Amino acid sequence: MSWSINIVCRDRRLIRRGGILLAFALAALAFAEDGNLHAPQGPVAGKPAEIGTEGSGSATLYLVGPSSAVKRDVELGKSISLSAKELQSAGRYIAVVCSPNCNTVSFFVAPAKAASVTFLVHPSRAAVAQNDAVSGVALAFDEFHNLVLTPIAVQFQLTAKGSVPMSRNAETRDGIAWFRTGSGRSAGPLQVTASVSGDVSARRIVQQVASDPCRLRIKGEKTAKGIVVETEPVRDCSGNPVPDGTVVTFTAKSGNETSSVDAPVKQDVARAIILAKSPVVISAASGVAMGNEVHIGGGN
Amino acid sequence: MLQTERPELLSLVSSCIGRRTLGIAALAFLVFSGLSAVFAADSATQVTLSVAKVGPREVEALTQRSVVRDYKFAWANLGLALQSNSIGPINGLFVGPASAWLSDAVQSQQQSGLSSRYSHQIHKLDAVFYAPEGDVIELHDTAEYDFEILDGSKIIHTEHATVRYVVLMTPGADRWVIRQLQSVPQF
């Protein structure tokens, strides 16, 4: 019958051919099954992976991840390759394949191995011999800035000049390890290092400074200008010279009269001139530290 | 019956208050309905915070309130950004890797003609780490929301999802900002 139509009418033959093509297309659609999707096995950030598909025919892939959204044509029945770049961010990905019905699979991409450490250390300056004065927090990241959540050994090392290096081992929990410790006894730089897996480390410096003056010793001398009083080198309780500018207050008491003068420490010593004609008792104080008293006769 | 009544009603109303007034009223309605949509998106996001497991530092009450407020605001704006494919809403709320990831997500959505929509968000936060000096807080967020992926205006995926996030927030000049927002299969 179709043969006769083809002979009789050329236009009708074209229509018939179109009909056959349409039938083929419909058949192809019928055979293009919306197959299941198979999530990649243990995908890791920055590494290529594959989504398995079932069925046949062409389809459209939508891949939505933490930092990406991809739409591209794929073939059902073949594995869908996901490039390393498409999977750089750790987290949940949703793959939707439509042909035209949509199938969905979700999967998690794990962070890669630790490649950097963010190391927060406080404070930048700490007085010596203080309990729990220095603390540090280390966060482990992979090369794509994903927080590495599997437990990793972290070694904290504290090194100060003239003292034995101190080491503390910790393990990250949810990507974080931390420590807290007292400051050392010597003023100077304290080097704090956090090392992950031996080859990834970060270093910070805490400047340890002398604490408050511990004891004051003063001496006085009568001169033509007045009574010159000065401290012996002012040190904290660990023997570190206090910083220049630390204020020492000299107090002179003569009878019922009391006068005082503040003098900054300069090159470890604070110095002042007290004008007095009658005998005076001079003392010194800085912070909570009190010095000795010196008795100096006035006038002669 | 209705078809005949409507023009009569309209003509009656327009004769009473005039076309210009109607136009202003319509404009006001549109503006307020738009604003209410924005506030609805914000208020629809529910955030609760537990500090029972936190250490080594305790989270002060004021900090708790700030974290909840800023996290909620950040998620509301994250939703707006991914729905409108604009990074404007997330400026200043996300920093570092979180900001870069979201910007990349918005950009790739734009390129692919996709958008995504978060709604009915409920976030249950557990503070698990608060640094001794208070300069970083780590949260576990068990988030529940409706999520849709759209290709143009066609919805290609919809789900009610429960997703767990590990979150790092740091204090900014006037708010807490999200530095890391990483979804995980489990805590």
Image (cartoon, coloured by chain):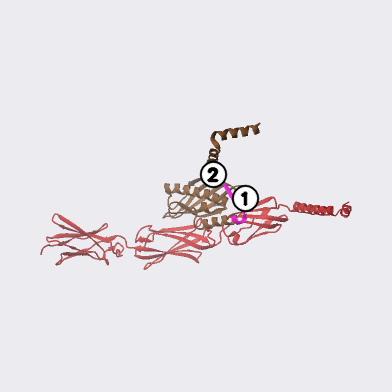
In the rendered structure, are the residues bearing label 2 and label 1 in contact, judged by CB atoms less than 8 Å apart?
Answer: no
Q: Is residue B65 above or below residue A87?
A: above
- The label shown at residue B150 is 1
Work out whether residue B179 or residue B155 is closer to the camera in this orientation and state it: B155
In this rendering, the count of numbered labels is 2
Furthest residue to the left? A300
Give the letter of the chain under mark 1: B
Q: How many residues crowd mark 2 within 10 Å: few (<14), some (14–19), many (20+)?
A: few
Q: Colour of chain A?
A: red
Q: Colour of chain B?
A: brown
Disc 2 with disc 1 on a shared chain: yes
Asked whether residue A66 appears in the rendered view, the answer is no
- Give the SS element for disc 1: strand
- The label shown at residue B187 is none
The residue range painted magenta reads: B110-118
Q: Could you tell me which residue is drawn at 62 percent across and 50 percent down?
A: B150
* Residue A211 is inside the magenta segment: no
- The amino acid at mark 1 is Leu
The percent position of residue A161, horizontal first and vertical second, equals 37, 68
The percent position of residue A227, horizontal first and vertical second, equals 16, 64
Give the letter of the chain under mark 2: B
- The label shown at residue B34 is 2
Q: Is residue A228 above or below residue B31?
A: below
